Image: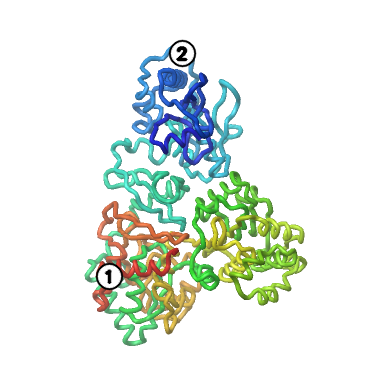
Amino acid sequence: MILEAAEKAGVKIPALCADKRLIGFGACRMCVVQLKGKKALIPACFNPVREGMEVITNSPEIIEARRAQLQLILAEHPLDCPVCDKAGECHLQDLVYEYGVVDNPYRMERVQKAVERRSPFIERDMNRCVLCGKCVRICNEVQGVGEISFLNRGIKSYIGTDFDRPMNCEFCGQCISVCPVGALNSKMFKYKARVWDLDNKTTLCPYCSNGCSLVLGIKDNEIQRITGDYDIGINEGNLCSKGRFGYEFVINPKRLKKPLVKKNGTFEEVDWDEALGLVVSRFNEIKAASGADSIGGLGSARLTNEELYLFQHLMRQGIGTNNIDHGGRYRGLLALKESFGNAGSTNYIHEIRKANAILLVRADLNETHPNVRIEVNLAVNRNRAKLIVVDNKRTLLSRQAQTNLIIKPGTEVALINGIINQIILLELADTTFVNEKTEGLAKLKTSIEKYTPEYVERVCGIKPLDLESAARAYAEAKNACIIVATGMGLIGNDHDIALAASNLALLTGNIGKESCGVYILPEKNNSQGALDMGAVPGFLPGYVPVDKPGLGAMDMLEPEKLKAMYIVGENPLLTYSLTTVRKSLYALSFLVVQDMFMTPTAEMADVVLPACSFVEKDGTYTNLERRIQGLKKILPCVGESRSDLEIFGELCKRLGCEVTEGEVSRKDAENAKRTTID
């Protein structure tokens, strides 16, 4: 479009209704330009560029047209600037100033509309709305929700929900982010600060494994708001409800501020020297009495790469055991290492939007990876991709699917093998790719012989016609990808699902090229990094196998398996079997918990060490596409809490396995070379 071409050429064209994420709409008419030799003014946002076209972007006629358009907008716009939260970053305010609109010949009797405050996060003041439609379009085009839309016609048009009911969506706040005026506001930020008083700092989201970048508005050493920026990070400014609004835990008054030691059944505050001294002495006593393998370490996939590396170093070199794991399911990633040689998703996230077919397996992306859902939505809406949803329930994406396969829980492998069986029988396999790039086809054919349509119907509950439809949609697509979610709350064998998905991708040649491949979506923000850094019982950093694998998380939490545990950033009482874990933790001779809050698991500990949040430390995270991104310390630690890296470093020093900061960085870089995309 002309608007995009002008921006690339460094020519500024004003626009109220344009956004890089949205299709041109032409609502505001501020972007009008003129073609050389033509009299008519045309919107630059939805007129395509042609070879040899000469465009006039600034002339007296164009300026006057833009001024007139601003006057029309202002005729019905309240002058709330002194109390409007958008002041200082209001696009309308900026344009009025730029074009010198100081008087207005238009008069209109205003009807004051009630401000909608029933939403928990979003306040809607339609008195300020300029009907640019950006909120409607991002909700529909990008989010795929369509919660709000244009209502009525002509001069009576306004934006709202059907029947003016309260908003009933996931409250991602995308509509707030694109609103050029103060019609949509964050209730969490309103009247807290002026935007020019904010010190904006960039960091990474601590929630899912997408690896979104956040822009934190800081004032008085507190987070006032979180926004996105199209030009920063991989998420194009898109944020979900957790990323945008889920930051209050950082300033929660219940944060742990000092080390705690349980004395006579009651926690008492102590200094760091006493707490760490007790941890080291008790670990050494238990190691001497029962051996190093009587101690286990359970870390978190929310730690940074540097912290995870040092944690496994502490357990392996300081304690002398491979009993180390992190809370999360990663066998699906290890299955990809068996198939493709790399334990991670095969393609970049943004390639999904250009896929022609998407097989979505057991992935409720609206709940687990909202920004990956955006990519799927863009593929379906803009690239006309065929979406095949395999799940045991209907999800938000089910309504966009060409084929919905509602299966019995835990039968994903049988379903995928049934699709493979159909592709072979219908001769839809990419035989050239299979013959040149793969091995073991005969073995695969033998293993999936039993997965006939009748067998799949009996096991999964899927009709043969639906199975064939899914097989054809996937195999006949030029570019097809498979997306599989993993997580503690999901039923099914991650390893076998990932292997079956890999076989399907290889059989159809959908690997090793753009917008294809297999995406395994880990649950937490650094699940990939936890695996890369060796926070697992069977591998050292960089996937070097150990001689004697230790106990995994589930085994460590079995009764009477261990004498002592060091739990960091995890709350196994809530994420694993409550009865079993409680019994196991009670049986321990010594329990150390390192966390930000007094969790139910921490309440059972002998020593509790207060840790910092993601905005109070430096480090790196590795997202689901194996992209390593950095975060910087933005706020001071709360109370006497310390970063996990600092705590691990001090324990390593006391246990005689000290690692310098430079060595951690060097080891991290070496591991990155072995684990990132070539």
Q: Is residue 383 left or right of residue 604?
A: right
Q: Is residue 452 left or right of residue 566?
A: right
Residue matched to label 1: 663
The kind of residue on which mark 2 rests is: Arg
Above-or-below relation of 337 to 471: below
Residue matched to label 2: 107
Q: Is residue 574 left or right of residue 564?
A: right
Residue 356 or 232: which is nearer the viewer? Answer: 356
The kind of residue on which mark 1 rests is: Glu
Q: Report how far apart the C-alphas of labels 1 and 2 lie in the structure.
A: 70 Å
Residue 183: give x, y in percent of width and height.
45, 31
Residue 80: give x, y in percent of width and height.
38, 25
| Residue at image coords 33%, 84% | 287
Residue 356: give x, y in percent of width and height.
62, 52
| Residue at image coords 39%, 31% | 90
- Within-10-Å neighbours for mark 1: few <14, some 14–19, many 20+: few
Q: Is residue 627 left or right of residue 422?
A: left
- Within-10-Å neighbours for mark 2: few <14, some 14–19, many 20+: few
Closer to us: mark 1 or mark 2? 1
| Residue at image coords 72%, 70% | 451
Q: Mark 1 falls on what kind of element?
A: helix
